[in-house]
Image (tube, helix red, strand yellow):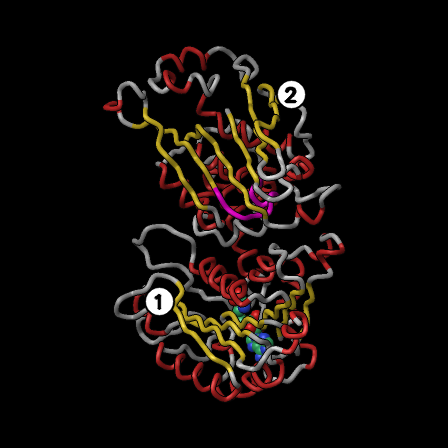
Amino acid sequence: MLLTLTTTHRPATDLGHLLVKHPDRVQSFDLPAGTAHVLYPEADEARCTAALLVEVDPLKLGGGRGHRRRAATPDSFTLGQYVNDRPYAASSLLSSALAKVFRSALRGESRDRPELAATAIPLEVRVPVLRCRGGADLAGRVFAPLGWAVAATPIPLDETYPEWGDSRYVDLTLTGTLRLADALNHLYVLLPVLDDAKHYWVAPDEVDKLLRAGAGWLADHPERSLITRRYLAHRRALAGTALARLAELRLADEPPADDIVDTEPPGEAPRASLAVRRREAVLAALRDSGASRVLDLGCGGGALLAALVADRRFTEIVGTDVSSQALTLAARRLRLDRLPERQRNRVRLWQSALTYRDDRLRGYDAAVLMEVVEHLDPPRLPALEDAVFGHARPRTVVVTTPNVEYNVRYDGLGDGRFRHADHRFEWTRAEFAAWVDRVATAHGYTATIAGIGDDDPEVGAPTQLAVLTSTETDNRKEETTR
Ligand code: SAH
C-alpha cells in the first residue's frame, strides 16, 4: 500500500527535514506486520514528494487463512497488485506505519525547521487505493471540514469489465494548506476510520492515542461521533469514554460563547461546518486587506488565532478577551509554551474589555470582531464603537454576527430564541446593515457586507459579514512606499 505526500512550498526539499528522511536515500523500517519504505519519487526546489510504501508480510499477519479467503473475493483481481494481502487491514497498517516512520513530524517537532513545522504549507496527499466503507462521499465528509479539498474516485472492480461496477476502494487525493503535523494526524486517525475493518489492536490506550492525535480538530468535527466509533472499532465502552472526553474539550474550547447552533440544517449535503466557513471568510478578508499586524477582539478559545498563527503573512497577532479563562484556553490551544520562540513572539494575549479605550490596541492594520458584538448589552454598543472605531482605529475591521432571519431554518429556533444563551440580541440583515452604515459614517470608514454559509433565497445566509475600511490616508503605507 502506498501513500504519497507532496509539497510545493519553496524550497520543497525542506519536506525531507520535516519528515527527518533524506530525499536522496531510500530507507526501510521493520513493522510488526511487514516493512515500510520511504523514498522520494521527485525532490527539487519547486516540488517534492515523499512516498511511504508498506509491504505486508502475510505470514507475519498471522497464518495463511487470509490467503485462502482472499482468493475468493472478486476485489483481489485488481487489487492484488497494490495490496499484498488482507486488503481489509490495509489502512490501519498504513496508519501505524505512518506513526512509526514519521513520529516527530506527527508531533509537530522539527530540529532543523521548527518554524516551518509550525507553518501551514501547500500539501497534496494521495492514497491510490484506500478501502472506504460507506462510499466515496464519506471521505469528503471526514476530510473536508478539516480544510482539505477532497477528490475520492471509486475504483472499478475490474477495468476490463466495467459492468461489474465499483469496488469498495477509492483513489483519494487531498489538497490543502496545512501544517504537516496536522495533515499527518488527520491521516493517522482517518485512514483506519474509512477502512473500518476489524482492528486487532484496539486497546484502552487507543482512546488516549485518538485524543492526542485528534487534539485541536476532533472535538469540533461534525463527524466526531462516527470517527470515534469507527476508530475504536465499535467498542461501545471505549467510544463512550472518548466521546465524553471530547465533549469536555468542546465546552472548554468554546467558553462561554460560540453558537450552540453552528451547523447547517439537517438533510443537506455534508460540507465544512459553518464555524470553519466563517473562519475561512474572515481569513480571506484579512488577506485581501493586506494586513500583517492583526487584532482578534473577543478571541474566545482562540480558534481564529490558531489559523492566523499558521499563516506567516501575519507577523503580529493579538488576541484580546474580557475573560481570563478564555485567554488561558487560547494559550493552551495555541500550545504557546511549546512554540519555538520566534513563533511565540508573534502572538500576544491580552485581557481587555471592548467597552473601554485601550491604548495598546492602537495602530494595527486590522481588527476582527468575530461573533462578539451580539454578546454585548445594546446600551454598551456605543462604548465598543468608540473603543474600536474611534480609539484603536485599525485600517480594516472585520465583523461577523448571526443573521436572526435564518433561525427559522434551524430546528427549535423558529420561535424567537437566539442561537446562544449568552447572545443579547441577534440582528436581521437590515438591522446589521443599518448599524454598519451608521458606524462607518460616524468614524470615517467605507463598508461592504456579505453572507457566510449557504444563501437561502428567503432568509439569506446564516452568518453576516461586514468589512469596514478606513478612508483616512494611510501614513504608514505612504512612508514605506516613498
Ligand atoms: N471570537 C471568538 C469568540 C466568540 S464568543 C469566536 O468566534 O470563536 C464572544 C467572546 O467575546 C467571548 O469569548 C467573550 O468572553 C468575549 N466578550 C464578551 N464581551 C466582551 C467584552 N465586553 N470585551 C471583550 N470581550 C468580550
Task: Give the left or right position of residue 419, taking residue 459 as reference.
Answer: right
Report the residue at 69% width, 81% height from top.
359
Q: Which residues are magenta?
A: 175-184
Q: Is residue 207 above or below residue 2?
A: below
Viewer-closest of 169 and 206: 169
Q: Which mark is residue 461?
A: 1
The residue that label 2 is drawn on is: 30
Report the residue at 39% width, 51% height from top.
271
Looking at the rendering, which quadrant does residue 295 occupy?
bottom right
Looking at the rendering, which quadrant does residue 22 occupy?
top right
How many numbered markers are drawn?
2
CA neighbours of label 2 inside 10 A, class few (<14), some (14 to 19), many (20+): some
Q: Can you tell me which quadrant of the image ligand 1 is in?
A: bottom right
Q: Is residue 182 magenta?
A: yes
Q: Is residue 367 magenta?
A: no
Which quadrant of the figure contains the C terminus? bottom right
